[in-house]
Image (cartoon, helix red, strand yellow):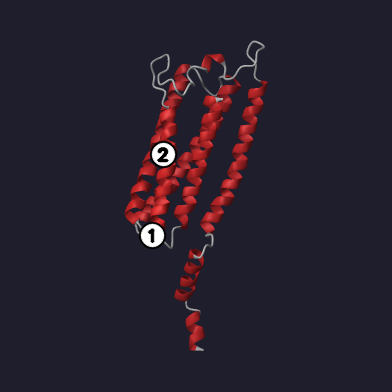
Amino acid sequence: MAADTTALTPETHAHAGADAHGSGGIGNPVLGMLLFITSEVMFFAGLFAAYFSIRAAYTENGVHTWPPSEFANILNPFQFQTESGALNVILPATILLVISSFTCQYAVWAIQKDNRTTFLRNMAVTVVLGITFLLLQAYDYTVLFHEGLSMGSTTFGTTYFTLTGFHGAHVFGGVLMLSVVLYRGMAGQFSAKHHDMVEATSLYWHFVDVVWILLFSILYLL
Protein backbone atom coordinates (compact mmCIF):
# COMPACT_ATOMS: atom_id res chain seq x y z
CA MET A 1 0.00 0.00 0.00
CA ALA A 2 2.85 2.35 0.89
CA ALA A 3 4.53 1.59 -2.41
CA ASP A 4 1.34 2.51 -4.29
CA THR A 5 1.08 5.81 -2.40
CA THR A 6 4.65 6.69 -3.28
CA ALA A 7 4.01 5.95 -6.94
CA LEU A 8 1.20 8.50 -6.97
CA THR A 9 3.11 11.39 -5.43
CA PRO A 10 3.32 14.60 -7.53
CA GLU A 11 7.13 14.42 -7.63
CA THR A 12 7.07 10.95 -9.16
CA HIS A 13 4.39 11.95 -11.66
CA ALA A 14 6.37 15.05 -12.71
CA HIS A 15 9.52 12.99 -13.10
CA ALA A 16 7.69 10.50 -15.28
CA GLY A 17 6.35 13.34 -17.41
CA ALA A 18 9.84 14.74 -17.87
CA ASP A 19 11.14 11.33 -18.87
CA ALA A 20 8.30 10.97 -21.37
CA HIS A 21 9.19 14.31 -22.94
CA GLY A 22 12.83 13.38 -23.08
CA SER A 23 12.01 10.14 -24.87
CA GLY A 24 10.72 12.01 -27.90
CA GLY A 25 7.23 13.24 -26.96
CA ILE A 26 6.01 16.60 -28.24
CA GLY A 27 5.04 19.18 -25.64
CA ASN A 28 1.76 21.06 -25.62
CA PRO A 29 3.38 24.48 -26.34
CA VAL A 30 5.10 23.09 -29.43
CA LEU A 31 1.96 21.34 -30.65
CA GLY A 32 -0.13 24.44 -30.04
CA MET A 33 2.36 26.57 -31.96
CA LEU A 34 2.39 24.15 -34.90
CA LEU A 35 -1.42 24.35 -35.10
CA PHE A 36 -1.29 28.14 -34.86
CA ILE A 37 1.33 28.34 -37.60
CA THR A 38 -0.88 26.15 -39.79
CA SER A 39 -3.69 28.69 -39.47
CA GLU A 40 -1.24 31.51 -40.22
CA VAL A 41 -0.06 29.71 -43.36
CA MET A 42 -3.64 29.74 -44.63
CA PHE A 43 -3.98 33.42 -43.70
CA PHE A 44 -0.91 34.46 -45.65
CA ALA A 45 -1.84 32.12 -48.50
CA GLY A 46 -5.05 34.12 -48.89
CA LEU A 47 -3.10 37.38 -48.96
CA PHE A 48 -0.67 36.02 -51.54
CA ALA A 49 -3.57 34.79 -53.68
CA ALA A 50 -5.18 38.23 -53.58
CA TYR A 51 -1.85 39.85 -54.47
CA PHE A 52 -1.29 37.66 -57.52
CA SER A 53 -4.89 38.15 -58.65
CA ILE A 54 -4.53 41.95 -58.49
CA ARG A 55 -1.12 41.77 -60.14
CA ALA A 56 -2.43 39.72 -63.06
CA ALA A 57 -5.30 42.15 -63.70
CA TYR A 58 -3.32 45.39 -63.39
CA THR A 59 -2.63 47.41 -66.57
CA GLU A 60 -1.03 50.76 -67.18
CA ASN A 61 -2.12 52.58 -70.35
CA GLY A 62 -3.50 49.30 -71.64
CA VAL A 63 -0.21 47.46 -71.02
CA HIS A 64 0.33 44.94 -68.26
CA THR A 65 3.15 46.14 -66.02
CA TRP A 66 4.11 45.46 -62.41
CA PRO A 67 4.97 47.26 -60.28
CA PRO A 68 3.68 50.59 -61.62
CA SER A 69 6.50 52.39 -63.44
CA GLU A 70 6.46 55.33 -61.01
CA PHE A 71 7.42 53.01 -58.14
CA ALA A 72 9.74 50.60 -59.93
CA ASN A 73 12.96 52.40 -58.99
CA ILE A 74 12.27 52.94 -55.30
CA LEU A 75 11.49 49.23 -54.84
CA ASN A 76 14.81 48.04 -56.23
CA PRO A 77 16.43 46.34 -53.19
CA PHE A 78 19.89 46.59 -54.75
CA GLN A 79 19.66 50.35 -55.14
CA PHE A 80 20.80 51.63 -51.75
CA GLN A 81 19.68 55.21 -52.30
CA THR A 82 16.49 56.63 -53.76
CA GLU A 83 16.36 59.51 -56.22
CA SER A 84 15.65 61.89 -53.34
CA GLY A 85 18.79 60.73 -51.54
CA ALA A 86 17.09 58.61 -48.84
CA LEU A 87 18.58 55.27 -47.88
CA ASN A 88 16.99 52.07 -49.15
CA VAL A 89 17.28 49.74 -46.15
CA ILE A 90 15.12 46.82 -47.24
CA LEU A 91 18.00 44.54 -48.21
CA PRO A 92 19.97 45.10 -44.97
CA ALA A 93 16.73 44.57 -43.02
CA THR A 94 16.19 41.27 -44.82
CA ILE A 95 19.73 40.10 -44.08
CA LEU A 96 19.34 40.95 -40.38
CA LEU A 97 16.05 39.04 -40.15
CA VAL A 98 17.59 35.95 -41.76
CA ILE A 99 20.53 36.14 -39.35
CA SER A 100 18.11 36.39 -36.43
CA SER A 101 16.61 33.05 -37.43
CA PHE A 102 20.05 31.45 -37.08
CA THR A 103 20.74 33.04 -33.71
CA CYS A 104 17.32 31.90 -32.50
CA GLN A 105 18.09 28.32 -33.53
CA TYR A 106 21.51 28.49 -31.86
CA ALA A 107 19.69 29.50 -28.67
CA VAL A 108 17.48 26.44 -28.92
CA TRP A 109 20.45 24.14 -29.44
CA ALA A 110 22.24 25.74 -26.49
CA ILE A 111 19.39 25.23 -24.02
CA GLN A 112 18.98 21.65 -25.22
CA LYS A 113 22.56 21.14 -24.03
CA ASP A 114 21.87 23.07 -20.80
CA ASN A 115 24.25 25.82 -21.91
CA ARG A 116 22.32 28.74 -20.43
CA THR A 117 24.97 31.38 -21.10
CA THR A 118 25.02 30.72 -24.85
CA PHE A 119 21.23 30.41 -24.84
CA LEU A 120 20.74 33.82 -23.24
CA ARG A 121 23.36 35.48 -25.43
CA ASN A 122 21.83 34.22 -28.67
CA MET A 123 18.28 34.93 -27.54
CA ALA A 124 19.25 38.50 -26.64
CA VAL A 125 20.87 38.97 -30.07
CA THR A 126 17.71 37.63 -31.72
CA VAL A 127 15.55 40.14 -29.84
CA VAL A 128 17.84 43.02 -30.83
CA LEU A 129 17.84 41.95 -34.49
CA GLY A 130 14.04 41.66 -34.47
CA ILE A 131 13.67 45.17 -33.04
CA THR A 132 16.19 46.50 -35.56
CA PHE A 133 14.18 44.97 -38.41
CA LEU A 134 11.04 46.73 -37.19
CA LEU A 135 12.86 50.06 -36.95
CA LEU A 136 14.26 49.66 -40.45
CA GLN A 137 10.82 48.78 -41.79
CA ALA A 138 9.36 51.87 -40.13
CA TYR A 139 12.10 53.97 -41.73
CA ASP A 140 11.41 52.32 -45.09
CA TYR A 141 7.73 53.24 -44.78
CA THR A 142 8.62 56.90 -44.22
CA VAL A 143 10.84 56.85 -47.31
CA LEU A 144 8.10 55.29 -49.43
CA PHE A 145 5.53 57.82 -48.19
CA HIS A 146 7.94 60.60 -49.11
CA GLU A 147 8.35 59.06 -52.57
CA GLY A 148 4.59 59.01 -53.06
CA LEU A 149 3.79 55.37 -52.33
CA SER A 150 0.92 54.92 -49.88
CA MET A 151 -2.07 52.68 -49.21
CA GLY A 152 -4.07 54.74 -51.71
CA SER A 153 -1.43 54.67 -54.47
CA THR A 154 -3.22 52.32 -56.86
CA THR A 155 -3.94 48.70 -55.98
CA PHE A 156 -0.21 48.11 -55.80
CA GLY A 157 0.17 50.40 -52.81
CA THR A 158 -2.79 48.77 -51.10
CA THR A 159 -1.47 45.23 -51.51
CA TYR A 160 2.13 46.23 -50.72
CA PHE A 161 1.32 47.82 -47.37
CA THR A 162 -1.22 45.14 -46.51
CA LEU A 163 1.30 42.32 -47.00
CA THR A 164 4.27 44.04 -45.38
CA GLY A 165 2.12 45.56 -42.63
CA PHE A 166 0.64 42.24 -41.55
CA HIS A 167 4.09 40.70 -41.62
CA GLY A 168 5.44 43.56 -39.51
CA ALA A 169 2.67 42.92 -36.98
CA HIS A 170 3.74 39.27 -36.81
CA VAL A 171 7.37 40.30 -36.30
CA PHE A 172 6.27 42.56 -33.46
CA GLY A 173 4.39 39.67 -31.87
CA GLY A 174 7.44 37.46 -32.33
CA VAL A 175 9.70 40.02 -30.63
CA LEU A 176 7.32 40.10 -27.67
CA MET A 177 7.43 36.30 -27.38
CA LEU A 178 11.21 36.25 -27.70
CA SER A 179 11.44 38.91 -24.99
CA VAL A 180 9.31 36.83 -22.64
CA VAL A 181 11.48 33.78 -23.33
CA LEU A 182 14.60 35.86 -22.66
CA TYR A 183 13.15 37.17 -19.39
CA ARG A 184 12.16 33.69 -18.25
CA GLY A 185 15.55 32.38 -19.29
CA MET A 186 17.30 35.01 -17.19
CA ALA A 187 15.12 33.85 -14.28
CA GLY A 188 16.44 30.31 -14.78
CA GLN A 189 13.13 28.78 -15.83
CA PHE A 190 14.50 26.77 -18.77
CA SER A 191 16.78 23.75 -18.85
CA ALA A 192 17.68 20.81 -21.06
CA LYS A 193 14.54 19.00 -19.89
CA HIS A 194 12.16 21.95 -19.79
CA HIS A 195 12.39 24.20 -22.85
CA ASP A 196 9.16 23.63 -24.78
CA MET A 197 8.38 27.35 -24.75
CA VAL A 198 11.77 28.11 -26.30
CA GLU A 199 11.17 25.62 -29.12
CA ALA A 200 7.62 26.86 -29.72
CA THR A 201 8.78 30.47 -29.96
CA SER A 202 11.63 29.53 -32.30
CA LEU A 203 9.16 27.78 -34.62
CA TYR A 204 7.10 30.94 -34.83
CA TRP A 205 10.19 33.07 -35.50
CA HIS A 206 11.34 30.74 -38.28
CA PHE A 207 7.86 30.97 -39.79
CA VAL A 208 8.01 34.78 -39.72
CA ASP A 209 11.42 34.62 -41.40
CA VAL A 210 10.23 32.28 -44.16
CA VAL A 211 7.20 34.49 -44.86
CA TRP A 212 9.44 37.53 -45.22
CA ILE A 213 11.76 35.70 -47.64
CA LEU A 214 8.69 34.92 -49.76
CA LEU A 215 7.48 38.51 -49.52
CA PHE A 216 10.90 39.88 -50.40
CA SER A 217 11.12 37.60 -53.44
CA ILE A 218 7.60 38.40 -54.65
CA LEU A 219 7.52 42.14 -53.99
CA TYR A 220 11.06 43.12 -54.86
CA LEU A 221 12.51 40.49 -57.18
CA LEU A 222 9.72 39.05 -59.34
Tell me the element at label 1. loop
Q: Which circle, 2 or 1, is nearer the viewer? A: 2
Residue for point 36% across, 40% down:
128
Instruction: Tell whether 73 sits left or right of 103.
Output: right
Disc marking residue 61:
none
Q: Is residue 15 above or below residue 179?
A: below
Residue in front for this viewpoint, 165 or 122: 122
| Amino acid at circle 1 | Gln
Residue for point 38% across, 54% down:
110
Q: Quadrant of residue 64?
A: top right
Q: Position of residue 27 (x, y in %)?
A: 52, 60
Tell me the element at label 2. helix
Residue in front for this viewpoint, 191 or 36: 191
| Amino acid at circle 2 | Ile
- Residue that numbered label 2 is attached to: 99
Q: Is residue 138 visible?
A: no
- Residue that numbered label 1 is attached to: 189
Which residue is the extreme one toward the bottom? 1
Q: Is residue 80 above or below residue 4?
A: above
Residue for point 56% across, 46% down:
37
Question: Counting other residues with Cα less than 10 Å from the Cα at mark 2, is it few (<14), some (14-19), or many (20 or more)?
Answer: some
Q: Position of residue 55 (x, y in %)?
A: 63, 23
Residue in front for this viewpoint, 139 or 64: 64
Q: Position of residue 58 (x, y in %)?
A: 65, 19
Q: Earlier in the sequence, mark 2 or mark 1?
A: 2
